[in-house]
Amino acid sequence: MSVSNLLENWSKFRHTHPVDDKGIPDWEAYPSDIKWAMSIDLDACTGCNACSVACYAENNLPVVGKDKYSHGQAMHWMRVERYWDEGDNGFQAEQGARFLPMMCQQCEAAPCETVCPVGATNHTEDGLNSQIYNRCIGSRYCSANCPYKVRYFNWYNYPEQENAWPAPLNQQLNPDLTVRTKGVMEKCTFCKQRTYTARNNAKTEGRPVQDSDVQTACQEACPAGAITFGNLHNPESQVAKQWQSQQVDLIKDIQEKDEKEGNRLRGYRVLEELRPYPSVMYLERVRESAV
Amino acid sequence: MKCFLRSLTLLVGLFFYASSHATDALPTLTTPDDVGPVVEQPIEFPHFRHAGDAKDGGMQINCMYCHTYARRSMVAGIPPIQKCIGCHQSIESVRDKPRIQKLFEYWDAKKPIPWKKVHDLPDFVRFNHERHIQRFYFQQDRPYQEVCGYCHGNVKAMTVAQRQKPITMGWCASCHQKDHPVSANSSETGHGPNDCFTCHK
C-alpha cells in the first residue's frame, strides 16, 4: 500500500521538469503555487562567512576540524568559495578575492534525484530538492552526480563517536530538524523547517505566504543583505522582482545577460549550460576588487 | 503404515500451506499489540473524570482546555500546574482525596509535575497538531473527542492515558490517502500531504 503509493508519487515528482521535450514550459507539472527561490548579490557579498556560520547553527552541522576538512569531509551546507584574479605575475593578492556563496541550488531538473537508487532525494511540490535521511542508504551516487558538489556525507557518527557537540553544547541543537547519523547524505534544504512554519502559519490565517513570513538562516545573518529568498511564483515577492528585473527565467538555460551583447544585466545561474535549472540566481560582480 | 505417513505428511503440509497463506493477507492496521505500554505517572490523572461523558460521571471538559496549544502549535502541550490549581483551589469537595493532596504538594513545593510522555514520536518526524485540529475541528466541525481520538484513542474513558493506536508511518499514511471533505458543508475533498519531506525532518 504505502510502497506503491510512494513510487507513484516519487515518479510524479521525479518527472517534474520545467522544460518538456518541445521546449515549452510545463507549468501543469507544478501542483503548488509556491516555488522557493533565492538570489545572491555578489557585489554586496564581502565573503565574511556569516551565512555559513548561521547555517551551522541552524541546521545542526558538526564542525569537523582541520584533519577531516583536509580530507574533504567538511559539512558546510553553505560555503563561500574564493576566486583569485590571475594577472601576469600570478595571483594578484592585493586585489582581493572574489567570493561566491555556494549551497544546494535546488535544481528543478536535479541530477542527484534521478540517480538515487532508493528515492531518498526527490522533488517536493514547493520546488525543493528534498533529502530524506530515513530512506538514504549512503550510496553517495547523488553527490557524485551533483555538478555543484554541495552534498555532504556523514562519514562519522558525529553526535556520539566524534562528540561534535560536547555537553552543554548539545543543548543548542535545533529541535526542528534531526541530528543526522553516520552513513547518510545531507545538504542545504532552504531551511525547510522555516518554510514549513511559514506555510503553516499562512494556511491557518488563510492567506498566501508573504516575503515577511520567512527568512533563511543565511539570509538573516548576512550583514550586507546580499541574499534574498522567497516565493518565485508570487510576483510581489522581492526575489521574483529581482529575477524579473534581471530577466532571468527559471526555464531558460542561457539568460539574457549572456545572450545579448552590451546589456547591463547581471543575473545568471551557475553552470546553467548543464541544464539542471537551478533555483538560485547570482548577480554578477561589477566592482573590480574587494579592497 | 506408509499410506498413513503419506497422508499425515500431506495433512501437515496442507496445514502449513493454509496458515502461511493466511498471513499473506494484509494485516489489519490496528492490532491489540499496538496498545502502548502502561506508563506510570506521578499522579494517576483520571481523564475519564475530566473529559468523560456526563453519563459516565465525567465533566466533558474540552481536551483543549488543558492541552491548549494543540490548536495553535506543533505540540499539544502538557498543562502547567497552575491550570490544575486554577480549578481545584475552589473545589473543596475533593480536596482531601489522595491524588489532589499530591497535586497540592507539588504546588506548595513550587515544583512542576514530572509527567511522562505517552505518545512519543521519533525525532525525525514532524507532526503538527495545529494542522490536524484546524482541519478536522474548525473546518469540518467535528466533535473534539472524535478528532483527538483519531490518533489518541478513547482517552475520555481512560484514567492515565495509554497509547491505543500504532502511530507508525503506514498508519499515518493510511489516513493521508483517504479523501476528506474540505469543510463541514463542502462536497469538495482533499487528502493529506503525501510527500516525504513534509513529515520527515
Image (cartoon, coloured by chain):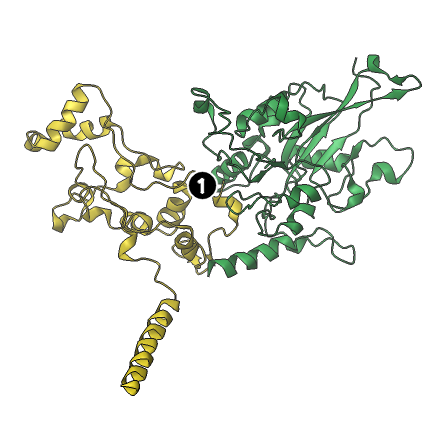
Chain colours: A green, B yellow
Please give left or right for residue B145 compared with residue A13 in the image: left
Give the chain letter at badge 1: B
Please give left or right for residue A202 compared with residue A139 in the image: left
At 40% from the left and 36% from the top, the residue drawn is: B73
In percent of width and height, residue A214 lies at: 56, 32
Q: Is residue A160 above or below residue A205?
A: above
At 57% from the left and 48% from the top, the residue drawn is: A120
Count up the numbered dots.
1
In percent of width and height, residue A226 lies at: 69, 24
Please give left or right for residue A32 compared with residue A17 in the image: left
Q: Which residue is mark 1?
A: B126
Instruction: Report the quarter where the N terminus of chain B lies.
Output: bottom left
The residue carrying pointer 1 sits among few (fewer than 14), some (14 to 19) or many (20 or more) residues within 10 Å by Cα, namely many
Kindly identify the amino acid type of the residue bearing the numbered disc 1. Answer: Arg
Pick whichever, A81 or B80, lies toward us: A81
Whether residue B20 is visible to the viewer of this picture, yes or no, is yes
The residue most toward the right is: A88
Q: Is residue A189 above or below residue A96?
A: below
Q: Secondary structure at mark 1?
A: loop
At 81% from the left and 40% from the top, the residue drawn is: A255
The residue most toward the bottom is: B3
In percent of width and height, residue A90 lies at: 89, 19
Pick whichever, A187 or A153, lies toward us: A153
Toward which corner of the image does residue B59 lie, by quadrant? top left
Q: Is residue A268 above or below residue A145?
A: above
Whether residue A110 is visible to the viewer of this picture, yes or no, is no
In percent of width and height, residue A104 lies at: 66, 36
At 53% from the left and 45% from the top, the residue drawn is: B197
Toward which corner of the image does residue B7 lie, by quadrant? bottom left
Please give left or right for residue B113 compared with residue B193 in the image: left
